[in-house]
Amino acid sequence: MQEVVIRRAAPSDAGVFLALVRALAEYEELDPPDADAEQRLIADGFGATPRFESYLAEVSGEVVGYAIVFETYSSFLARPTLYLEDLFVLPTARRQGAGRALLHYLAAEAVRRDCGRMEWIVLHWNELARGVYRRIGAEEMQDWCFCRLSGDALRRMAEGAQ
């Protein structure tokens, strides 16, 4: 197995980062970010006040995957949580250890930051990823439902119309 290098993405990586985000959208059969969203991703990831951190996985000097993380906070643990928003490895580069290397790197980062846990969500149909997560000891949270307010519902709630 070839060595996998994990590194924090730099502003000069914005193009490859966006290409990987588009590849994830294609893999998940979702619409990719439009031009405005891509500009927000660059500003929010690489601007003066980043809203998230991104990390890249390289094999033989080629970027093959990425992860996006940010911190949330657990009031019950009274510690931060490292939340993994995206983890993606190009299908052509799988089974080379890049995904596992990203998870290892981020878990070490969570420990370094004194986080109480690391969390993420996974699509039900993505059995490949779910199998990897089970093998590393991740627990699927059966008692919790993932909820989302977006679009018109979010605006109505913000306006007090709900």
Image: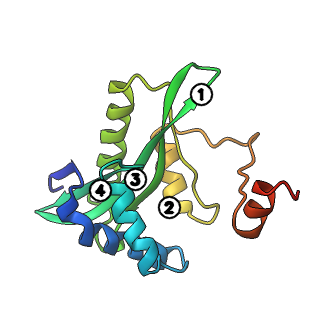
Other-residue count near label 2 (Cα within 10 Å), few / some / many at <14 / 14–19 / ≥20: few
In space, the residues marked 2 and 1 are separated at their CA atoms by 29 Å
Vertical position of residue 26 compared to residue 60: above or below? below
The residue shown at (35%, 47%) is 49
Considering the numbered disc 2 on the image, is that residue within a helix, a strand or a loop?
Answer: helix
Residue underneath mark 3? 68
Other-residue count near label 1 (Cα within 10 Å), few / some / many at <14 / 14–19 / ≥20: few
In space, the residues marked 2 and 3 are separated at their CA atoms by 20 Å
Give the mark toward the camera: 4 or 1.
4
Q: x and y percent of residue 76 in the render?
A: 65, 20
First in sequence: mark 2 vs mark 4: 4
Which residue is outermost to the left? 61
In space, the residues marked 3 and 1 are separated at their CA atoms by 19 Å
Q: Which mark is residue 74?
A: 1
Give the mark toward the camera: 2 or 1.
1
Q: How is this picture coloured?
A: rainbow
Q: x and y percent of residue 98 in the render?
A: 28, 55
